[in-house]
Image (cartoon, rainbow, N blue to C red):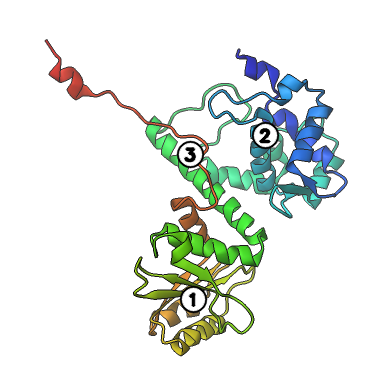
Amino acid sequence: MSETAVSVPDFQSMMLPFLQIISDGKERSRGYIVEAIADSLDLTEEQRNMRHPRSGENMLSNNMSWIEMNFIKANLISRPRRGSYQITKAGKEILRKKPKSISCRFLKDNCPSYAMWLKTRIKKEVDIESDAPPEIVKPPEELLKDTYSVLCSDLAQELLDTVKSAHWRFFERLVVDLLTRMGYGGSRQDAGQVVGKSGDNGIDCIINEDKLGLDVVYIQAKRFSEPVTISQVRDFAGALLAKKARKGVFITTSTFPKSAVEFVSQIEPKVILIDGQRLAQLMLEYNVGISVKETYEVKRIDFDYFDENEL
């Protein structure tokens, strides 16, 4: 058994201490919780600083990421702000049961939302705590693709939640960053500008469609929780007409009604609607607000090499 495995508790061993530390209902930062867990488990300085052998990430911080994902799916914690956590009503109910430990199996048996998430995540149910490998019902490459798809789906939702919790001014700058990454206007400095303010007639950002600035795209960026209304989309289209603009993009963290989609398909100027799910997908595709943690190569035997060198 490796030194890392022996020296650092696995993430399931840290689940109960995590929930106990935030049991008072106060908002706690990620760093505070990591230190408190380390103290509760009486970890040495060496254990606290242990790094993952492949990614180089702090092992305790890596465990926190796994706990966060599972607790969010189980509805035991909320993220009032980026990098901070708070216990939910469901989390307090779990602690009232006075469990001796909390594991993924425990969450599956006691948290309906977590059990439902597992069903959509894993088509063939596997004992989470078992050390035995799951029955392979697909080729390894297909299993890898399925797992990657699940990771992307979870990350997209987490990314959207983070965007919703950010300041609305930041959201407008994020939109310009995204469109720049998508190839509009060249550099971030020259491509676009945030203009949203009182009396902006529904225009929050302007971005060049090409590097020479021969045409521009007008943008409305709304960090909403409630669905956008058809009247708001009509107002944006009216603002475009007032500026004699031919193209506009309405981006929101929420959703658009079907009537809005039908409306923009029938009018000039051209208006593109991007809802929260599409926004998160584009951010993933163009690496906005995310970083690559690990990269895996899928390799195969090069049979041509052996054929060419066959005696």
Q: Nearer the viewer, mark 2 or mark 3?
A: 2
Q: Which residue is mark 3?
A: 147
What's the amino acid at mark 1?
Lys
- How far is disc 3 from disc 1 in space, using C-alphas? 32 Å
Q: Can I make out residue 253 in this image?
A: no
What residue is rendered at 64% in x and 37% in y? Answer: 66
Q: Residues within 10 Å of mark 2 (few under 14, many from 20)?
A: many
Image marks 1 and 2: residues in contact by CB distance under 8 Å: no
* Residue 92 screen position, x and y as percent: 83, 46
3 and 1 marks in contact (CB < 8 Å): no
Relative height, residue 243 to residue 158 (above, below): below
Q: Which mark is residue 258?
A: 1
Q: Are marks 2 and 3 in contact (CB under 8 Å)?
A: no
Disc 2: which residue: 61
Residue 276 located left or right of residue 102:
left
Residue at x 69% of width, y 51% of height: 82
Between residue 93 and residue 209, name the one nearer to us: 209
Q: CA separation, marks 2 and 3?
A: 22 Å
In the depicted structure, whether residue 159 falls above or below residue 124? below
* Residue 133 visible in image: yes
